[in-house]
Amino acid sequence: MVTKIEKVFRSPYAVPNGLQVTDDGLWIVDQITDRVALVEITADPDYTVPKLIRDIPSECSNTSGMTFGEGALWLAANGPGERWRTVRDTDAKPGTGEIFKVDPATGETLGRYPIPDGGGTHGVEYDPYDEGHIWVQTLKNQVTHKMRTSDWSIQKTLPLPHGRGHGMVRVEDGLWSTHTSDRVIVKLDLKDGTPLDVIEVPEDCPEPHGLSIYGDDFLYCDAASGWVAKITFS
């Protein structure tokens, strides 16, 4: 059960819209510039910001979600970046989303993959229990697809219980799915998507955008306020 939801530190970027814990630290992506920062998971006591290890550019756009697997970052592009900055040639097209596979050392694009149903996306999760597979949330049909990365084919589809799916964490016995507008994080049965458990995020806590496992707990970020928050389980 959840015992506490608390602010940890402010993101090095103004609009953090995806995050992922790795062995090297915490990756955070900025929705405006689409740069990705690797930071230590500790906060300066005076300024409540983490120590920056490095940051890299990316060719992603309007980035809304991130994960790590196969030695690469996977960034979810929810259409072009025209709301935040000048459009670039590499941006996803209007009304469409893509998943970018990105070199974490240089920011080089290693691959681009379409959202299976068309439309946009807010969430992506590499499956640590099934190497070579990645979960992709879709806004158009409100489902999450399990994709095989080698040929980008759909292996499984689960319905989402709420709209605006915005980040996931795969655990051994389920898939946690964040739903920003409803301020809930729902654990789904891997067989049919049946809700098994729910975390309610109170109004006085940062809004959940993205989700990552952190030991036995979760971290999430809030694009609206810039905070990174921790969900502690007993």
Image: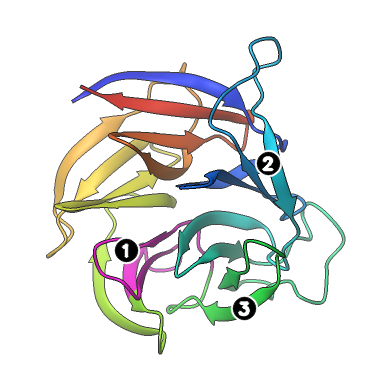
Horizontal arrangement in the rendering, residue 109 relative to residue 128 (left or right) = right
Element at badge 2?
A: strand
Q: Is residue 218 on the magenta stretch?
A: no
Q: Which residue bears the numbered disc 2?
A: 53
Q: Which residue bears the numbered disc 3?
A: 110
**Nearer-N-terminus badge (1/2):** 2
Residue 163 seen? no
Contact between labelled residues 2 and 1, with CB atoms less than 8 Å apart: no
The image quadrant of residue 228 is top right
Numbered range of the magenta stretch: 120-146
Q: Please identify the residue farthest to the top as the structure is shown.
A: 46
Q: Disc 1 versus disc 2: distance between alpha carbons?
A: 26 Å
Could you say where residue 31 lies in the image, as x and y percent from the top left? Answer: 68, 50
Is disc 2 surrounded by few (<14), some (14 to 19) or many (20+) residues within 10 Å? Answer: few
* Residue drawn at (27%, 32%) of the image: 199
Q: Mark number for residue 127? A: 1
Element at badge 1?
A: loop
Mark 1 or mark 2, which is nearer to you?
A: 2
Could you say where residue 13 lies in the image, as x and y percent from the top left? Answer: 72, 38
